[in-house]
Image: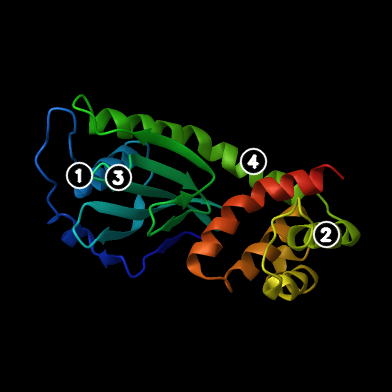
């Protein structure tokens, strides 16, 4: 459920290789930060809250100026591991940012999606990496229970087959829907009526959510990323208003 998508403009590297990527010199208004220092600071801040990182993935641009990563933790909710997505640039192209949740997607264009965004920070001359990460991880720690409640809410919300059909039709066809590619419409129907896993047999908003996300795997990485980010608010509005 947590994914790092690297492509032609980036290359995947190990944590050890990331440590070798050096930032440019600081200026009067801009303070570059080593990518590896950010990852280490996040891991340390999580450990102080009894959360361990079990898997790390990183990718950098060809010049090493931009980095994005995924840090999967040992904190689970019903088999789903919470993760932290991170991005950083030392060429002023974008801010240091974190995203967190049980469904985190980090893409090579530095856009990313998760259940909430705990941190966005500029590399100003007064920037403190330790303070920024501490603030972001504090917000992650406080919001973990909220993310779990959101999943439980979807699982408890029953959805009739008729409503599910209406929601699927709206997602693909209606102007106020998601305007998804019709090539995956049959897959969404199949995943709803004949889910692969037993946990999605109950007819709930959570099962409908899974019907869509499972079908999204047929899309190209960037489109998959974009549609996943729009799905939860769409389903909340479409199923709770009926």
Label placed on residue 164: 2
Task: Point out residue 178 in the picture as x, y percentages from the top left corner.
Answer: 69, 56
Q: CA distance from mark 4 to mark 3?
A: 35 Å
Q: Are marks 1 and 2 in contact (CB under 8 Å)?
A: no
Q: Residues within 10 Å of mark 3 (few under 14, many from 20)?
A: few
Task: Point out residue 55 in the picture as x, y percentages from the top left corner.
Answer: 35, 59
> Mark 1 or mark 2: which comes first in sequence?
1
Task: Identify the residue under disc 3.
Answer: 93
Q: CA distance from mark 2 to mark 3?
A: 42 Å
> Mark 2 or mark 3: which comes first in sequence?
3
Label placed on residue 4: none
Q: Image check: 198 left or right of 65? A: right
Q: Are marks 2 and 3 in contact (CB under 8 Å)?
A: no
Task: Point out residue 72 in the picture as x, y percentages from the top left corner.
Answer: 40, 55
Q: Are marks 2 and 4 in contact (CB under 8 Å)?
A: no
Q: Residues within 10 Å of mark 1 (few under 14, many from 20)?
A: some
Label placed on residue 37: 1
Viewer-side residue, 70 vs 75: 70
Q: Residues within 10 Å of mark 2 (few under 14, many from 20)?
A: many
Mark 2, secondary structure of its residue: helix
Q: Are marks 1 and 3 in contact (CB under 8 Å)?
A: no
Task: Identify the residue under disc 4.
Answer: 149
Q: Residue at x 75, y 44 (%)?
A: 237
Indicate whether 12 appears above or below 106: below
Viewer-side residue, 15 vs 74: 15
Q: CA distance from mark 1 to mark 3?
A: 19 Å
Q: Image check: 85 left or right of 209? A: left
Indicate whether 101 appears above or below 219: above
Q: CA distance from mark 2 to mark 4?
A: 22 Å
Q: Residue at x 35, y 57 (%)?
A: 54
Q: Nearer the viewer, mark 2 or mark 4?
A: 2
């Amino acid at each position: 459920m947590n994914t790092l998508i690297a492509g032609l403009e980036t290359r995947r590297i190990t944590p050890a290789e990331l440590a070798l990527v050096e930032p440019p010199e600081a200026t009067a208004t801009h303070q570059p930060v080593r990518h590896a220092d950010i990852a280490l600071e996040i891991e340390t801040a999580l450990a102080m809250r009894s959360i361990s990182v079990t898997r790390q993935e990183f990718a950098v641009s060809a010049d090493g100026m931009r980095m994005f990563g995924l840090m999967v933790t040992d904190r689970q909710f019903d088999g789903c591991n919470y993760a932290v997505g991170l991005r950083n640039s030392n060429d002023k192209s974008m801010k240091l940012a974190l995203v967190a949740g049980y469904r985190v997607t980090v893409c090579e264009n530095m856009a990313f999606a998760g259940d909430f965004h705990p941190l966005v920070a500029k590399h100003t001359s007064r920037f403190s990496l330790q303070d920024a990460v501490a603030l972001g991880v504090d917000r992650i720690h406080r919001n973990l229970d909220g993310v779990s409640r959101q999943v439980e809410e979807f699982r408890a919300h029953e959805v009739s087959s008729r409503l599910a059909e209406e929601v699927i039709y709206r997602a693909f066809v209606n102007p106020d829907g998601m305007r998804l590619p019709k090539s995956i419409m049959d897959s969404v129907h199949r995943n709803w009526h004949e889910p692969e896993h037993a946990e999605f047999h109950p007819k709930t908003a959570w099962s409908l959510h899974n019907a869509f996300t499972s079908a999204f795997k047929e899309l190209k990485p960037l489109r998959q990323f974009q549609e996943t980010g729009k799905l939860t608010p769409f389903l909340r509005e479409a199923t709770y208003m009926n």
